[in-house]
Amino acid sequence: MIEPFRIAVPQSDLDDLHTRLDRTRWPHELSDVGDTFGLPLARVRELADRWRHGYDWRTAEAELNSHPQFVTEIDGQPVHFLHVRSPRPDALPLLLTHGWPGSIVEFLDVLGPLSADFHLVVPSIPGWGFSGPTRARGWDVDRVARAFAELMRRLGYDRYGAHGGDWGAAVSRALSQHDVEHVVAIHLTYLPTPPQPGDPDRAQLSTQDQGRLAGIESYQRHQPAVRSFNATRPQTPAYALTDSPVGLLAWLLDPMTMWAAVDFPISPDRVLTNVTLLWLTGTGGTVARLHRESGGPASWRTVQPVGVLVLPEDITLPVRQLAERRLPIVHWTEADRGGHFPGLEVPDLLVADLRAFFSSVSASASASASASTSASVDG
């Protein structure tokens, strides 16, 4: 059963948040270290002050509620989602999956433009936001993908596209295997291409691609501490993340700062809406379970067309020659700006690339169908 959902946070929860912000115990900071030890105290204090005195959750709540929302139970787990239908009856359904440290907030700035061309389904991954904490072990990427395939079936969508970056890219790739009969194509904004046996010798790669490969290998060797905690001991930081709003703010802002473009084009209120969403739902610590549950290399086999949008300041940059050995890539765009969160940083580029990719996929499918019909008639 799919039920309508509307966000209505009790005022007592907001009052509690404000009280906790007022009572923050601030840590000591070494002088003249910049960000080499972590987020600078001044930056966190400035954003926390805005959270307490300048940010209005009710405005964000109203924005979220301006989009139709629903909840359904799949595999024993509530799944919350936005469902924004296009005025075009023949529009292609498009499943948008967020990542970490983000949430559905990543897509708020693209819902309007994209809904002109797509029926949009934007779920909160189990463990996130209004999908609530996961209720059992085993919620890895494959289980999330199967749940989202069931969600699309319940909505009556027989064929649909999928898009994502970060965990959303992994879920989209898993969907391409688990729901192969219904996923028409996938679009990714994050595609790590670490070396694999049988790859060309790196001397055969361009100088640019050798640099990208070196960046991937460096990131694998020196992953941020937050990712190590997520992958191994997520319950331990969960106590602080569930009890201290400033702790949650700093924990999420740190990787967001490292992975976004250097000028950090994400608005303070978007950062705070993302953090507040996880704070109010008590899921700041449970979102990391997906990382803990999803260990091991990806093994999804994709046969559908794949589109890739490369953001120049992302965590790592894919090597196209290697990516094309792993996936049936038919569309590749090298953007001129943006980092790991395109929906928040460069929503215009993301919208344009999604339109271009899925238009080309639809045109190719129509051409193939016409050719098949012609051949049948000629026969």
Image (cartoon, helix red, strand yellow):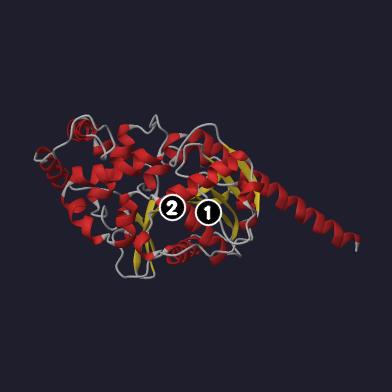
Residue 263: % across, % down: 39, 29
Is disc 1 placed on a helix, strand or loop? Answer: loop
Which quadrant: the N terminus? bottom left
Q: CA distance from mark 2 to mark 1?
A: 9 Å
Amino acid bearing label 2: Gln
Amino acid bearing label 1: Pro
Residue depicted at 38% across the width and 54% down the height: 124
Judge from the rendering whether residue 177 lies leftward or rightward of residue 64; answer left or right. Answer: right
Residue depicted at 20% across the width and 45% down the height: 247
Q: Which residue is mark 1?
A: 194
Residue depicted at 60% across the width and 61% down the height: 302
Q: Residue furthest front?
A: 203
Residue 352 in view, yes or no = yes
- Give the quarter of the image for residue 256: top left
Which quadrant: the C terminus? bottom right
Residue 19: % across, % down: 10, 41
Neighbourhood count class around disc 2 (C-alpha, 10 Å): few under 14, some 14–19, many 20 upward: few
Residue 147: % across, % down: 44, 65
Residue 334: % across, % down: 58, 37
Neighbourhood count class around disc 1 (C-alpha, 10 Å): few under 14, some 14–19, many 20 upward: some
In this rendering, is residue 91 above or below 158?
above
Residue depicted at 64% across the width and 41% down the height: 206
Badge 2 vs badge 1, beta-carbon distance below 8 Å: yes
Q: Which residue is mark 2?
A: 220
